[in-house]
């Protein structure tokens, strides 16, 4: 069993390292995009409108697309095992065609009722922001046609063992957005929305060509088979479950739109930092593990499914726990270095940094939710996560309405983090009750070891930070060096302590470098 565990971790680590490097570069492009936006347009009405116009299509359709693509992998695995690759291609094509029809209908609705949607979903916006968001929305809604179909092809490639193409495709999206932001600065900000649309179109083209290259044959078929009908039925509860993150985030933005100017942007920019961290770690782990979990479920190998799931949880905790602690002590410095320039002033830094801290408290739970829900989905159990998602959403709404009165936008971020934690705990304890042979938590003692190592590592980095205290406020380059030295020191201490405490995941990863 120990040898099998090591093989799982080693194989995952090899792919994850390459994915992390490419994702980091992609995220850097993403941050360049956001910092260029912040520098040129600040945290005012243009940015608020731009952010909301990106969010609304995702809120209204993103959950559906995520539900279908998430449900796709276990059903595709089942189809391949029973009927072979040709039937798998037919199934994939029919799902893609179904989403094309849905996307066209959604785009027409978005075009005709853009103003009404903005007034409904951003009721705190003034007339100026409503008009601009409505104009942007007529354009951004069209990107759903490309993003929906690309999500299915991404899932197809992941099941086939190709994880890098979709990351590379993200480069095109960000490059198009950056180019459009710069172009809009010197022409008209009305062109901003076209960058999103063109980027998604190029992204779809890249992943589709890769799928064709490895043997995928697209079929123009709208015939609904039992499996296609099943994906529709199963996607409904997954749709509700996957909406937890998007609904919670949008509730934050909707309530923040009634607060002082810049609150929406502060929540947006702070969540970007959180998703950068989870995107480079937990999301990669979940993406790699999900096809393995689905295959184990298809083969009815519950022992292997439990083994893979618990290792995934361990790896996510090893990465996210120290980052959560680090955000508390280094959040303001990070936000200042990343965003504070041009129109993004010290006031915007303060708003964003405080929200970043409270979002950071829930980062571990946000990361775990992604993996834990997929374990349920691999067993075609979509209803249980849906129920838990509903409970956590109610918790978020209630806490948002209470905490926003006392903590302003920080209360919204804290409420979202608490909601994520509630959802995680429900998923863990729900599995213990419904699936006694599946264990997400391999060892409580191991989690305690990880927390101890993280606390000691962050404490050590704070000591190093004090040694460099005289270097503060001596320019951006010096502050970046100071932060990097603290980060590097914390990583070294953390890894040494974990290795000393005999955390087997660290030992398995270490073997890659021998």
Image (tube, helix red, strand yellow):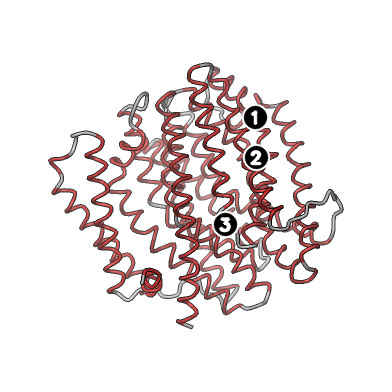
Spot occupied by residue 237 in the image (x, y as percentages of width and height)? 67, 55
Q: Name the residue under label 2.
A: 60
Locate residue 404, reporting x and y percent.
42, 38
Relative image position of residue 60 (x, y in whole percent): 65, 39
Residue visible at 50% across and 73% down in the picture: 8
In the displayed structure, 288 sits above or below 337; it is below
Which residue is labeled 1 in the image? 117
Mark 3 crowd level (few <14, some 14–19, many ≥20, 10 Å Cα): many
**260, above or below 230, in the image:** above
Give the label on residue 80, or none: none
**2 and 1 marks in contact (CB < 8 Å):** yes
Secondary element at image label 3: loop
Q: Position of residue 120 (x, y in %)?
A: 62, 30
Nearer to us of marks 3 and 1 is 3
In the rendered structure, which disc, 2 or 3, sits on the residue that comes first in sequence? 2
| Name of the residue lying farthest toward the right | 223
Which of 16 and 453 lies nearest the eye of the viewer? 16
Query: Which residue position holds label 3?
Result: 163
Q: Which of marks 2 and 1 is nearer the N terminus?
A: 2
Q: In this rendering, which labeled residue sits more in front, label 2 or label 3?
A: 3
Q: Quadrant of residue 224?
A: bottom right
Q: Closer to the camera, 140 or 477?
A: 477
Pick the residue in front: 149 or 394. Answer: 149
Mark 2, secondary structure of its residue:
helix
Q: Distance between the residues labelled 3 and 1?
A: 36 Å
């Amino acid at each position: 069993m120990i040898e099998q565990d090591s093989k799982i971790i080693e194989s995952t680590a090899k792919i994850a390292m390459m994915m992390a490097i490419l994702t980091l570069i992609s995220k850097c492009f993403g941050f360049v995009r956001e910092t260029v936006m912040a520098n040129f347009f600040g945290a005012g009405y243009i940015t608020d409108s731009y952010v909301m116009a990106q969010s609304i299509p995702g809120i209204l359709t993103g959950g559906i697309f995520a539900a279908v693509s998430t449900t796709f992998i276990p059903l595709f695995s089942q189809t391949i095992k029973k009927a072979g690759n040709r039937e798998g291609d037919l199934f994939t094509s029919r799902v893609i065609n179904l989403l094309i029809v849905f996307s066209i209908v959604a785009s027409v609705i978005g075009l005709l009722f853009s103003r009404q949607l903005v007034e409904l979903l951003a009721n705190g916006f003034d007339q100026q922001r409503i008009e601009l968001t409505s104009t942007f929305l007529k354009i951004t809604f069209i990107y759903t046609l490309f993003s929906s179909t690309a999500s299915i092809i991404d899932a197809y490639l992941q099941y086939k063992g190709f994880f890098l193409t979709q990351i590379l495709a993200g480069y095109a999206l960000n490059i198009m957005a950056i180019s459009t932001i710069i172009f809009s600065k010197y022409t008209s900000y009305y062109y901003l929305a076209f960058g999103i649309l063109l980027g998604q179109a190029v992204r779809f083209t890249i992943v589709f060509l890769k799928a064709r290259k490895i043997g995928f044959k697209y079929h123009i078929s709208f015939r609904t088979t039992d499996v296609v009908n099943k994906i529709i039925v199963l996607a409904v509860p997954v749709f509700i479950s996957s909406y937890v993150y998007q609904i919670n985030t949008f509730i934050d933005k909707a309530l923040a739109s009634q607060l002082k100017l810049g609150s929406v942007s502060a929540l947006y920019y702070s969540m970007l930092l959180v998703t950068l961290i989870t995107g480079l770690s937990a999301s990669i782990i979940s993406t790699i593990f999900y096809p393995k979990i689905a295959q184990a479920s298809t083969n009815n190998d519950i022992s292997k499914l439990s083994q893979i799931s618990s290792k995934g949880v361990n790896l996510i905790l090893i990465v996210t726990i120290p980052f959560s602690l680090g955000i508390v002590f280094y959040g303001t410095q990070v936000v200042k270095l990343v965003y504070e320039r041009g129109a993004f002033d010290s006031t915007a830094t303060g708003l964003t940094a405080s929200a970043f801290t409270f979002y950071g408290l829930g980062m571990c739970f946000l990361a775990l939710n992604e993996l834990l829900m997929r374990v349920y989905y691999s067993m075609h159990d979509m209803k249980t996560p849906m129920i838990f998602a509903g409970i956590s959403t109610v918790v978020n709404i209630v806490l948002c309405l209470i905490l926003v009165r006392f903590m302003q936008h920080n209360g919204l971020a804290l409420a979202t983090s608490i909601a994520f934690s509630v959802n995680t705990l429900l998923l863990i304890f729900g599995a213990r009750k419904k699936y006694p042979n599946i264990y997400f938590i391999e060892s409580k003692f191991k989690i305690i070891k990880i927390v101890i190592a993280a606390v000691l590592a962050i404490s050590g980095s704070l000591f190093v930070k004090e040694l460099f205290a005289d270097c503060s406020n001596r320019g951006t380059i010096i502050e970046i060096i100071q932060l990097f030295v603290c980060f590097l020191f914390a990583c070294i201490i953390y890894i040494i302590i974990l290795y000393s405490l005999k955390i087997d995941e660290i030992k398995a990863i270490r073997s890659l470098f021998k």
